Image: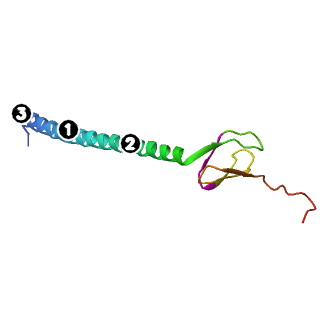
Amino acid sequence: MRIPIGSLIRLGLSISENVAEYQKGVNEKTRAARARDEAIAETNKYNRSRLEDQIARESISVECPNCGSTGNRIRRGSTGFCQFCGTAIQVGFNGEIQFHKPEIERDGDQ
């Protein structure tokens, strides 16, 4: 049985139209997903900025008296440790600072 060429051409055009419609739907879903991802990224950026601002208000920068490191940020009302030498740094809610030098273990001490 022979299929007329005109029928094959119509069938090919029909398939092409279906593929084009499918691709259009995929592109629209992709655009919507991209827009959603961008909105989520903006929200995350805003939330991170708010959190960083809150931490900056609640913490103070402390210079370590043991090693002189200036990269220590400690929250008020908590104890932190120097990121370089391990000195304990206690910060009161009023911003008062106390330092506690780390204990060094010596051989033979019990």
Q: How many marks?
A: 3
| Category of crowding for the residue at label 3, using alpha-carbon neighbours closer than 10 angstroms: few (below 14), some (14–19), many (at least 20) | few
Q: What amino acid does circle 2 point to?
A: Ala
User: Is the N terminus in the top left, top right, bottom left or bottom right quadrant?
Assistant: top left
Q: Is residue 10 above or below residue 59?
A: above
Residue type marked 3: Gly
Of discs 3 and 1, which sits in the foreground?
1
Residue interval drawn in magenta: 71-78
Q: Position of residue 62 (x, y in %)?
A: 66, 43
Residue underneath mark 3 = 6
Whole-percent x, y for residue 49 in the image:
45, 42
- Image quadrant where residue 69 sits: top right
Residue that carries the numbered disc 2 in the rendered image: 41
Q: Nearer the viewer, mark 3 or mark 2?
A: 2
Q: Secondary structure at mark 3?
A: helix
Q: Looking at the image, is mark 3 or mark 2 earlier in the sequence?
A: 3
Report the amino acid beneath label 1. Answer: Lys
Q: Nearer the viewer, residue 9 or 82?
A: 82
Can you identify the residue that label 1 sits on? 24
Crowding at dot 2, Cα within 10 Å, few <14 / some 14-19 / many 20+, comes out as few
Check if residue 76 falls in the magenta segment: yes
In the image, what residue occupies the spot 63% across and 54% down? 92
